[in-house]
Image (spheres, rainbow, N blue to C red):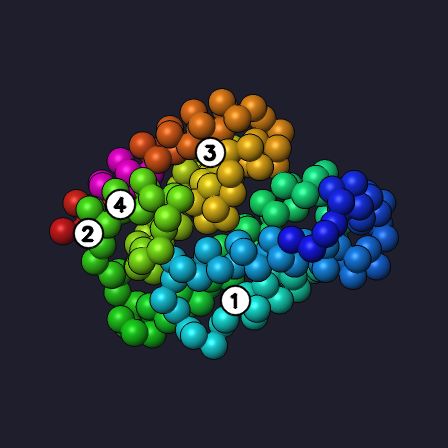
Amino acid sequence: MHDAHPQSISHVLQELSAGNRGAFDELFPLVYDELHLIAERRRQRWDGDETLNTTALVNEAYLKLVDQSAPDWQSRAHFLAVASTAMRQILMDYAKRKRAAKRGGRKPHVALQEIEAALHEAEDPSGVRDEVLVALDDALRRLDQRDQRQTKIVECRFFGGMSIEDTAEALGVSPATVKRGWSMAQAWLYRDLKESVEGAS
C-alpha cells in the first residue's frame, strides 16, 4: 500500500459517508495497492478471459464502487471487504458467461475432492478451477439465506484473502467469532455442495 496513514483513509471514508463524492478520487490512490493484491489473489483462482487482467479487475471494481449512491464504509477493512465482494461479482459474471457459452448452459461436473480442497486452502487457493468457484458461489448464495454473517466471512477470507483480524474489523465482530463462523461456514458449504454433487451424479 502507498504510504498512507490509516487516519487519512478514515478521514476520506468519513467524507464519503457525509456525501462528498469527490472523496473517491482521494481514496482510490490510498487503497490501490491493497486492491491490487486482492485482485491478484482473485485471479489466481480463476482461469477466465485473459483480457481481464489484474489492473482491469481493479478498475472495474472501482467503477462498481463509485456507482454506490451512499457508501457507508467505517474503516479501511470494511472498504476492502466491500471491494472484495465487488471483485467476486465481476469474476463470477465473467466465469459464468464463459462456461454457459462453452458448455451450452449445462452444469459442469465438479469432483467432491476439489470442493474439499478449495474450502481448506483459503491461504493458498491458486489452481482452483472456475467450475469449482462457480459451484462455491452458488452454494454461498444459499448460505446467505441462512446466515449472512457467515457468507460475509467467506467472502472476506476465501474470495478476498483477508486476515482473521481484518475480517473481524470489517464485520464489527471479534476474531474468535470470525474463526468460529469460518469453520461453521466451511462445514455447511461442504455438506451443501456434497448433496449437490451427489444429486447430479
Tell me which corner region of the image, top left, top right, bottom left or bottom right, holds residue 140: top left
* Nearer-N-terminus badge (1/4): 1
Type of secondary structure dominating the magenta stretch: helix
* CA–CA distance in space, label 2 to label 1: 28 Å
Instruction: Please name the residue that numbered disc 1 is placed on.
Output: 54
* Nearer-N-terminus badge (2/3): 2
Residue kind at label 2, given as amino acid type:
Ala
Tell me if residue 24 is in the magenta stretch: no
Which label sits on residue 111? 2
- Local crowd size for mark 1, using a 10 Å CA cut-off: few (<14), some (14–19), many (≥20): many
* CA–CA distance in space, label 1 to label 4: 25 Å
Q: Is residue 173 above or below residue 60?
A: above
Tell me which corner region of the image, top left, top right, bottom left or bottom right, holds residue 172: top right
* Nearer-N-terminus badge (1/3): 1
Which label sits on residue 150? 3
* Nearer-N-terminus badge (4/2): 2
Q: In the image, what residue occupies the spot 58% across and 26% down?
A: 173
Residue kind at label 3, given as amino acid type:
Gln
Instruction: Please name the residue that numbered disc 4 is placed on.
Output: 117
Which residues make up the magenta segment?
A: 189-195
> Is the Cβ of the residue at disc 1 closer than 8 Å to that at disc 3?
no
Q: Is residue 93 above or below residue 140?
A: below
* CA–CA distance in space, label 1 to label 3: 27 Å
Task: Work out whether residue 134 can be spotted.
Answer: no
* CA–CA distance in space, label 4 to label 2: 10 Å
Callout in the foreground (4, 2): 4
Which type of secondary structure does the marked residue at label 2 adopt?
loop
Residue kind at label 1, given as amino acid type:
Thr
Which type of secondary structure does the marked residue at label 1 adopt?
helix
